[in-house]
Amino acid sequence: MDARPLVIDPDITRASTLPGSFYTDTDRFERSRERVFARSWQWALDARELDGPGAHRPLALLPGVLDEPLVFTRDEAGVLACLSNVCTHRANAIVAAPGRSRALVCRYHGRRFDLAGRVQSMPCFEGVQGFPAPSDDLARVPHAELGPLAFVSAAPEHAFERLIAPVRERVGWLPLDAFTPAPERSRAYEFDAHWALYCDNYLEGFHIPFLHGGLNAVIEFESYTTELFELATLQIARSKPDEPAFDLPASSPEHGERIGAYYFWLWPNLMLNFYPWGLSLNHVQPLGVARTRVVFQSWIWKPELCDRGAGSGLHTVELEDEEAVVAVQRGVRSRFYSAGRYSPAQEAGVHHFHRLLAERLA
Ligand code: FES
Ligand SMILES: [Fe+2]
């Protein structure tokens, strides 16, 4: 482990970036499991997958980092819950596959829970003192929703609303519930780089003219902007005259402008990219210190706008970005590289992210 303190100067004009060693440091990667990921809000699923009373769906929270077995349920009244999917008897996984039922029944010895996680019955437990106690119920895991998107946190360090407020305020007018999932435009990418390098790259548009010729041809790079929020950033791309743009309501700060993309990054590893056609979500999932999976999920609002403008050609842009971050992962290992400096005009988002990381991993 690199024993030097992890400090990022709050003044971007004086600051140096995270050291190259950060991206190969297995101890800091291990510490990030609890200090970064367990305490953060993670995108989980489209809550509409739980379509009606009794629906339940298991998932592993951040496989590779947290691997926490959870299950979402919808009860008779339609209320969504997120529960631990680990039986309180002897820790078997309760729900193995999505389904529908009036109760969750453990397949190992038959302990039965209602859809809110309360123990209902258990075979052969007559005479067990103090059973059932509240500790025999399934743990309820904090969850939250943005339109149909459901989020969970194992041990939230902040309220979900503190994270999501910039999204609600800026694009809350979008009818997210009318966006439809597009599995054919959803896929996962895996590559050899630290998860934070992928975020670093996302958090600046500086590289667009250099790496993304196709994207650069459809946006007005000169007017690309970055805004910082407590736990988020927003990058805005304006469209070239013939490219698609949002029809913005009068309440929007950009009303009257031709916006081609709102790129939100949410601490620590989620991107919500809103385009005139809909939403592309990127969930960055660390698999190891130098191995990352990024899950792309799309929801379509206006299909006729899919193949034009900043929101088209996402696969090509992704491959261009991956090539860069994989090259950087090789570069940060160099004995001749220690750390870099930031462009105040172009890399405020990267600086902000590094400060949030350093605060938690110092
Ligand atoms: S582990 Fe679930 S009933 Fe025994
Ligand atoms: Fe990029």
Image (cartoon, grey):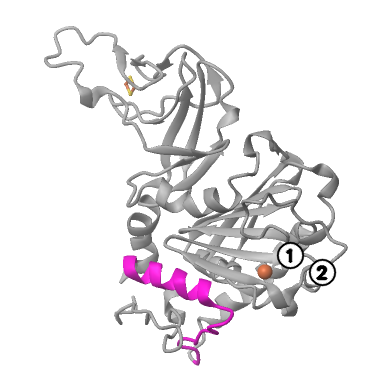
Query: Outermost residue, right direction?
Result: 242
> Which comes sooner in the sequence, label 2 or label 1?
2
Is disc 2 in contact with disc 1, using a CB cutoff of under 8 Å? yes
Q: Which residue, given by chain and number where applicable, does mark 1 sit on?
A: 317
- Residue 226, above or below 71: below
Tell me: 249 left or right of 131.
right
Q: Which residues are drawn in magenta?
A: 336-360
Residue 290: horizontal and vertical position, in percent?
A: 51, 67
- The kind of residue on which mark 2 rests is Gly
Nearest the viewer among 212 and 164 is: 164
Residue 350: horizontal and vertical position, in percent?
A: 51, 73
Task: Check the picture and name the quadrant holding the N terminus.
Answer: bottom left
Residue drawn 45% across the image and 30% down it: 71
- The kind of residue on which mark 1 rests is Val
Residue 324: horizontal and vertical position, in percent?
A: 65, 74
Does any atom of ligand 2 lie closer than 8 Å to the CB of label 1?
Answer: yes
Does any atom of ligand 2 lie closer than 8 Å to the CB of label 2?
Answer: no
- Residue 37, above or below 209: above
Dot 1 falls on a residue whose secondary structure is helix
Q: Which residue, given by chain and number where applicable, does mark 2 sit on?
A: 214
